[in-house]
Amino acid sequence: MTTAQGAGAARTRGLRRTVLAVAGLNLAYFFVEIGVALAIGSVSLFADSVDFLEDTAVNLLIFLALGWSLHARAVAGRVMAVIILVPALAAAWQAFAKFSDPAAPDPVSLVVTAGGAVAVNLVCTLLLLRVREHAGSMTTAAFLAARNDVIVNAAIIVMGIVTALSGSGWPDLVLGVLIVVLNVGAAREVWEAAGEERLAARALTGEEPR
């Protein structure tokens, strides 16, 4: 094995350990957050808990897909773009279901749970920041998802304070809509990154780009 091959193998092992750790953190906090969301009836917290499950799936897919060809990575990237839309659809459905009766969720539970989510997602973001260029659109997907989750968690904390002051359930619904917008934007970025990898794969095989 050459020095370059050894370095590449070491980098792959490091990336595998990183994404597996991130997947484990996300799966553990998913159960925490969805339990609280169901207990207090929060739309935004429910949508954010689905984000944790989405991040788990994305990082596990990266773990399995390492070593694949550029074309296979492009396909995996586009699959991830679709996966990122799942929490957006979940948030939209919950918001629609609660629209006629926007009862305010417990603000203390919101703030405490979102604070824990900020800590988990910040750790995941910092871990993925070091490896985001190592597997193209796949690690880009994981990094964008974790980054967006930190923003959403901070917004939930602010929303919890507003809810405590106003006693209204509308801030929870509005934040649910914002989560939809964030996830659609992330999905678009990942789809475009996967498209670039697809073009690169075609160039390597001598095919004309489409």
Image: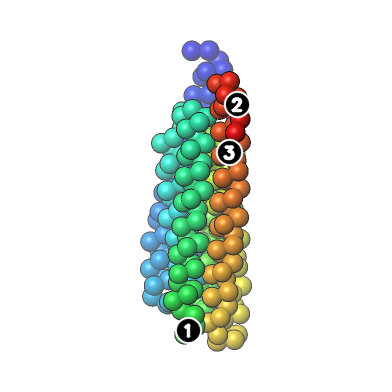
Horizontal and vertical percent position of residue 85: 50, 56
Q: Which residue is mark 2?
A: 208
Whether pointer 2 and pointer 1 mark residues with C-beta atoms closer than 8 Å, the reply is no
Q: CA distance from mark 3 to mark 1?
A: 41 Å
Classify mark 1: helix, strand or loop. loop
Whether pointer 3 and pointer 2 mark residues with C-beta atoms closer than 8 Å, the reply is no
Per the rendering, the mark at residue 90 is: none
- At horizontal 45% and vertical 69% (from top left) the residue drawn is 93
Q: CA distance from mark 2 to mark 1?
A: 53 Å
Looking at the image, tell me whether mark 3 or mark 2 is earlier in sequence order: 3
Given the current orientation, which residue lies at the most extreme top position? 2
Amino acid type shown at disc 1: Ser
Q: Nearer the viewer, residue 155 or 68?
A: 68
Horizontal and vertical percent position of residue 141: 54, 46
Q: Which residue is mark 1?
A: 100
Classify mark 3: helix, strand or loop. helix
User: What scheme was used to colour the molecule?
Assistant: rainbow
> Dot 1: few (<14), some (14–19), or many (≥20) neighbours within 10 Å?
few
- At horizontal 38% and vertical 68% (from top left) the residue drawn is 35
Above or below 113: residue 204: above
- At horizontal 51% and vertical 77% (from top left) the residue drawn is 108
Horizontal and vertical percent position of residue 146: 55, 52
Q: State whether residue 22 appears in this view.
A: no
> Dot 2: few (<14), some (14–19), or many (≥20) neighbours within 10 Å?
few
Amino acid type shown at disc 3: Gly
Q: State whether residue 145 appears in this view.
A: yes
Q: CA distance from mark 3 to mark 2?
A: 14 Å
Classify mark 2: helix, strand or loop. loop
| Residue 210 in which image quadrant | top right
- 3 or 2: mark nearer the eye: 2
Per the rendering, the mark at residue 195 is: 3
